Structures are given as structure tokens and as C-alpha cells.
Amino acid sequence: MATIDRIAAPWGTRTPYGPGEHWPTRVDTHLTEGVSETDVDRWVQSATILHSNGDGLDIAVKDGRIVGVRGRAVDRVNHGRLGPKDLFGWQANNSPDRLTKPLIRRDGRLVETDWDTAMDAVAGRTKELLDERGPSSIGFYTTGQLFLEEYYTLALIGHGGIGTNHMDGNTRLCTATAAAALKESFACDGQPGSYTDIDHADVIALYGHNMAETQTVLWTRILDRLAGPNPPKIICVDPRETPVAREATVHLAPKPGTNVMLMNALLHEIVANDWVDHDYVEQHTVGFDELTKQLAAYPPDRAAEVCDVPVEDIREAAGILGHAERLLSTVLQGFYQSHQATAASVQVNNINIIRGMIGKPGCGILQMNGQPTAQNTRECGADGDLPAFRNWSNDSHVEDLAKVWNIDPMQIPHYSAPTHLMQMMRYVEDGSIRFLYVNGTNPAVSLPELARIREVLSQDRLFLVVQDIFLSETAQLADVVLPAATWGEKSGTFTNVDRTVHLSEKAVDPPGEARPDLDIFIDYARRLGLKDKDGQPLVKWTGPEGAFEAWKECSAGRPCDYTGLSYEKLRGGSGIQWPVNDEHPDGTEHIYVDGEFWSDPSYCESYGRDMVTGAPLEPDEYKSMNPSGKAVIKAAEFLPPHEEPSDAFPFVLTTGRTLYHFHTRTKTGRTPQLQQAAPEVWVEVSEYDAKQHGWNEGDLLRITTPRGRVEARCRVSGIRPGVVFLPFHYGYWDTPGGHAPEGEAGRAANELTITDWDPASKQPLFKSAAAIVERVRAGDGTPSAAPTTTGSKPMGELPVTTTGGEQALATEEMAGTRAGGAR
Amino acid sequence: MTNKVPMALEELHRSENDLAGELLQASDRHKVDHEIFYLGRDLARWSQEHVRELARIGEDYGLDLDPEPEDDTKLVARVRQKGAELLGRHHDPAVLLLRDLREIHRKAAGVSLDWEILAQTAQALKDKELLALTKRCHPQTLRQLRWANASLKVNAAQIMVTA
């Protein structure tokens, strides 16, 4: 059993394998100092919660406290592996500054109170507003980090009980475009891919997807393929020189805002060279002719100019895609949070569709999620969707849902799509929403244009409820703060990108008076007196397993069918991929096999939208376009970005994440190994720009946009010239400002970002702002605090590299080395 | 053969310009409604492009139409934007949004019918170039129309119910 510093080596040791072979098992374990495996009282089954990969793990418990984690060898997702955030992040659960009592605002200050007082205030204000102004004055903003049972309960309370249309998740910021792109191409959410496609693919194309940092274990799987015989070719589209780019056969680094242009050029080459599966296109798709017509305007030379990418690289990438025999495509924030997000992501789908590479081993699409349970936010209808992928513009779907909930269909608002977050913030701003219930998310750091968001959330007329585990920047603005239990302290299920459902069981008690989110929601429903049409309580369950059973009924016959699952079935073994039903009792590795889709007009989740205007298609328009349930090839025209660099604002600012942190650092910032690996904000500039302006590693730079300014120390990295990068994780909870910058310059990247979103997915654009960059003062030779192991790797040698030392050691146990074999 | 093509082109040139202006003005008036602000501009660009195309084809019919479309991104617009920001905290101006969307819809419907007239005429005259122009432009008008309708549907309930 070897030990390794997993801060210095985020992906651990290679276990090479070849195409079609089994990915070898490697069990990663980290236990707190002084505790060995034999000291552990209990191992409690769960899965990872600080990214979207959904790796199976066991939580080690000793004396009623979490003392470590170990990857589950039997799990199909990770084969025992864990990433650095999983190995160390659990320590945040034990953090001394956890919220342990409800807080209520009295005379302008948040003071401790009891649950009854807090919940009466929350339910009381809800009832007052329902009487005075109706359900449209009530909004819910949830997360991608709760459990399925909690989202489903919240969706029932909001849509079915209160009857408001205003419910969204912070999944709007990370995966809304994933869902939207799937709805455009397949008329339904649900991933047409499986992680096992990595085992078979001969080409893997990653579009705006720095998988090495966002899903470390999935990247480990690719690294192991790359280290084995007959490795796949890698195509990377990213303006930064990420770890993915360093492994790529072709790395395309387009100018931010030009993704559609680049995708159209790749498609243009594939079609022009006739690398098209015409039988597949003929039998299983609509829209190919329109695509061909549209592509005429996008020859590679034009794209090379607009995207500022060498034309031969575009041709080479297209040739690799065109000759692929088993093509896996993955997409993430580089597309989702950029200009024309949905249109660009749909073009990725189009490549797999016209090449007939869907629903077979190695042939898939992963429109990735950013958060561990984002898939459930979408499935359960706690975002801009209805539960179980029901179509809000199909009356029979709404009637069916009303039957499941035993309420009148009119009670469920469906006169337009559920309100997306940015529109909700607008309604809060104009005072038409007066009650906002935020749980498990931190808009005061994660939304664009923070000065505006702080003003919007600080209004006196707004009653703000925040349910969280720490006093986040947003919680500091709240009228009532409800202390929640987190992962490891409550039971429930959640589902990852490739439809794998995991059970996560309670390992320890929550601290103080903190309660599971599910219990809080049920309490809220009870205090509101929500009833079904027979006068019975609307929420008919009291715990997670009851909620799961109710959800199974709601999902029956829908694409995300959970009817064949139970807590018992999920206990002990691997996670299981939905749909799980009579037809597929052990789950479903690939959907859309043999060109069978869920896109029939009477069954589909969505009729799609115009990708430029965002206008939803009317039912009749969809029926005439796609009468018999095929895949939809949707072409897209390129539009110039809304905020382009100018003489006044000459740089393009892009924001993103680092491997060592998650979201606004509420947990990772309280984890010593992770916090020390990336302790403070930095700004990445290219070598070219550094030379032009005389900036050096470690200099303090100021980045200014029309919305605000941020100061950060300089890292000269492999980013493309003209572009600067800021990580978005750093807010103010661990600074003197508390919830806002103290001086004029902040450190949250979102001080600078623009309030603009993709018209189809409504996902905000965090990757396209025009900026000024200036030096505030020269450094003293000390490098910036940016990690050296990741996308922020320095161009030259630095005196220090990112390591974790003794406290970051984890063990690795390769297959066959464990007594008793793989567990 | 004399026909009324020049008249139809002139009318479309006028109505597309008018629609572009309406979209830009609505965009400016609702800067705090970010989707209206940005899409108003994106969609005005289609009408502006149609104006240029109409001016170009108009030459074949002896017309001298101004190829420079309506474009009020100048001083007036900036004043209007500032006003929108000041009003952004109040709900009542939202009613103006419905009025503006209604106006865009009305004008886009007019433009759509004008394209319909031109397309029918082009077919009767077997004028391939003119027909191609209508096939390029008219679908975009329909998308403008559907956008105005969809935006109105999204906003109407909130504006009317929670005043």
C-alpha cells in the first residue's frame, strides 16, 4: 500500500489500460492523523459531493465523528478512486463555525433564536404575502448540492402547494445549458453517454471542459487510457493551456465568444468531406438539409480569422473527428458560460449525430454537470423544469403531474416556463417578488455583477431566508438564517452526469440544532397548512425513504424512471444508472440505442427554443418539424458577442475554477490542505501580454470592467494573449468585509462580470467581459499563490510548487493488492 | 411590363427601418431588463441587414433607397438608458414593457405581411433573385415576431398580477 501527496499529485498513480479493457481498481483512502483503518468504528456508504462526478465512497466514523473517507472499489464510476476535494473536504463538516442555531434579524442584526420562532417568521411572511400579493410574490432559489428527496419535496411545495412559477436552482449557473442543449437535440434531458465510453473511445473531444480540474477521477480514467496501449486521440477546445490541453493531439484556443463559429467550421469540414453516416441521418434525424445550407457560410478560413486559430489546426481537428470510429464528446463551462452557449453546445451534439455515434460503447455525449446533484435539481423540477421531465407546455403532462400530487392542474403554474434565476432577481429588483428562500447556494458571490446583486438582496422590502451550513456572504444579508445538516449528516440519494444514482447514508449527527433540509421543508409545508384536494397534507412523507418512494411514483414511465430502484437495492454495491424499471432492472448503460429517442411530441420534455431569440416552439411547430420522434439537428448562425474588447477595455476577462476549490469555498476554504493549495485569488495573463506591459509573476494587478474592480496577484500562464483569467471562488466571508469588499477593489471575480445570459438556456455568461488590466505595484519576487499543478501552471520555473506535505498523504491500493481481493 | 415591385420594396424598406428603430428604442428603454436590452439589439440587426439588402436590390428597380439603416445608439439612447436605470427599482414601468413588446409585435407583423406580398409578387414574376431575398429575410421577421410574443407571455402575468 503506497502513500502519495494528493495535493501535489491530484490524479494519483497511473494504472494503464487498453481499449475495451476493464479500468483497473485503485482504492484511495485518507484518514485523519493518528487514525488507521482498524480504529474506524463504522464505514458508511455515500458518494462524492464536491464536484459532479459522483464517485462512490465510504465515510469513516469514529466516536461519532467523521474521520476520513475511502473510495468504493465496486463502484462503476470511480473503481475506488477519489479526488483531492473528496479526500480532504469532509473536514469542513467538523468546522467550528458551522451554523448550529437559527438566526433572525432583530434591530438590523442577526441574533440566535429557536426553530419555532424562525419557522413561524418564515411561514408567517409567506402567508402574509400570499394573502396580499399572491404566489407570484414568492420565489425559491435552490442548489445543485441537496439530495433528490429534498428537491422533489421543494418542487411539490413550490409548484404544487404555493403555486408559484418562481423556482430555480443554481444549476442555472452551471448546467442549464447542458439540459437546454439536450432538449434542443433530443427534446429531452438525459445523457446520451456513459463514463464507460472512455474505456472504448478512440477519440475524445473536450469542448470548454477542463475535466482534469472539474472531474478529477474522470480525467484519471482518461489519463490511464493515455498511458495504456492504443490510446485515444484528444481534442481540446479551451483558451487556456489546461492539463487537458497539454495532453491534446490538437488544442484549439479560440477567442472567447466565438465557439459557434469554430463548431460550424468543424461541421463544415465534416460535411464537405462527407464523413457523414447518411443511413443514420436518413433514418433517425430531421434537419440535416438545413444544417448543410447554414454551414456554407462557415468555411475554416473564415473561422480561423474570427476565432484567431490556425486554419490547419481546424482542419486537423475536423479530420480526427471525421475519422473517429468511437467518438466521445464532452462539454462544460467553456461553452455553457460563454456567448451563444446553447447554440455552440448543440453543434457538439450535431457532430455525434451526423456521424451516427450515439448509444454504442465509446460513442456518446456528456453534456456535463457542474455540481454533484444538479441532475436531480433538473429531474425533480426544482429548477426551470417540471418533475420527471414533464413538459410544461403539454397540458396532459401537467394533468398527469396534478394526478400524482392529487391537486387541481390549475394549481401548477404552466402558463410559461418556470421563471429562471436571472429573471427572478429582476423581479426581486423591481419589488414584485418580496420573499426569496435561498438554500445551499451563495448568490452574493456566485452571480454576475455583484454590486447589483448585493443591492438587490439588501432591499428592506425583501424578506430573505437563507438555509445553509455556514454564515455565507448571502446569509449575512438574510432576515432569517436556518442551519442545515449536510452530506454525512442526513440520508438521501443523488444522481451524477451519467445517470448513476447513489445512496448517501447518514454517518453522524448534525452539529447543534442543525436539521436536514428535507425536515425543514416538511416543517415549512406543515406550518403553511398545505393540503391536497382531499384536504390531506400535501407532503405525505416524513423522511427521505418516503420521499424517494413518492418520487418513484412520479417518475414512473418517464425517461428518468426510478421505479426499479430502492434504498435496499442501492445499498452495498455500485451506483445504478437510470432508467431502472421492469425493462431495465439493473439500470441502463446507454440510452438512445439504435436511434430510439424520447422526442415523440406527446412524450418529450421540451419542444425546444429558437437558439437566438429564446422563444419556445409552439406545440404545433414542433409536431410539424419532428412528427415521429427523431433526433433534431439544429443549425446555428454565429452572432458577435455583446461585449467585445475595445480601446477603452482592451482585454477579455474569463472566469473559472481551480481543482482545489468548489464554488464559493464554503467547504474547501475550511479544509487546510485545499485552502493552502490555493489560498488567495490570482489573475492569469499570457506571456505575450506580460512582456508587452512589463508585468511579472507576483505583481499586483487591477482588473476593471464597467461593473467594478478586482485586485489580484499576477500569474504568467499559458492562457491565450489578450485574455485574462480570474478564479471565481474567492468571496469575502474570510475577509474583514464579511459579505462585501472593504475598499474599492474586491477579490470576487463576479464584481466584474456582465449581467447577460444565453437566450435559450438562460445561463449567465461568466466568460465574456471586456476589461482593463493595470499594475498597482510590482511584486517583491514572491510568486502569486496560484497552483502550479493545474491550468494556472506557470510558464517558467518558480521557486515553489504546489505540494501538500505530510497532511496531504493518502494511500493507494492497486487491484489485487488488498487482502480478500477487490471489495 | 409595369408592376408595383418598386412600391413594395419602398414600403418594406420603410417598415423594416421602422421595426429596427422600435427594437432599438425598446432595448434602450428597458436596459434593466437585460434580455430585452440585448435581444432588442441582436434582433434589430436583422432588420438593419434587411434594409441594406433592400437598398441593394432596389437599384435593379431604379430605386435610390438609403442603405444606412436606423441606428440610434447615440446620445438620445444614452439618456434613455440612464432613465431606465433610475426607474429600474419601480414596478410600474414594467407595464411599459408590455406596451413596447406589443408595438414590436404589431410592427413585425406588418413587416411579415410586406414580405409575404413581395414573395407572392416575386413568384408571379418568376423573379428568382427577389424570391431568394424573401426566403432569406422573411424567416427572420417571423422569429422577431415570435420573440415579441414569447417575451410578452413570459412577462405578462408577473406584471399584471403583482402590481
Image: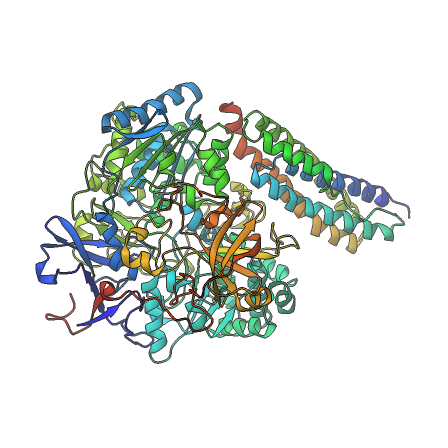
Q: Is residue A59 left or right of residue A349?
A: left
Residue A53 in sight: yes
Is A626 drawn above or below residue A138 in the view shown?
Answer: below
Residue farthest along the top direction in this orientation = A132
Quadrant housing residue A385: top left
The colouring scheme, among rainbow, by chain, secondary structure or one colour, is rainbow
Is A274 drawn above or below residue A594 in the view shown?
Answer: below
Q: Is residue A467 left or right of residue A236?
A: left
Quadrant housing residue A315: bottom right
Residue at (52% x, 59% y) in the render: A724
Residue farthest along the bottom direction in this orientation = A229
Q: Position of residue A156 (x, y in %)?
A: 33, 34
Quadrant housing residue B147: top right
Q: Nearer the viewer, residue A783 or B56?
A: A783
Q: Nearer the viewer, residue A689 or A559?
A: A689
Q: Nearer the viewer, residue A388 or A128?
A: A128
Q: Position of residue A306 (x, y in %)?
A: 63, 63
Residue at (45% x, 63% y) in the render: A780
Residue A346 in sight: no
Q: Position of residue A714 (x, y in %)?
A: 48, 61
Residue at (73% x, 50% y) in the render: B49
Q: Position of residue A492 (x, y in %)?
A: 23, 46
Q: Is residue B4 left or right of residue A288?
A: right
Q: How many marks?
A: 0
Residue farthest along the front direction in this orientation = A780
Is A71 drawn above or below residue A134 in the view shown?
Answer: below
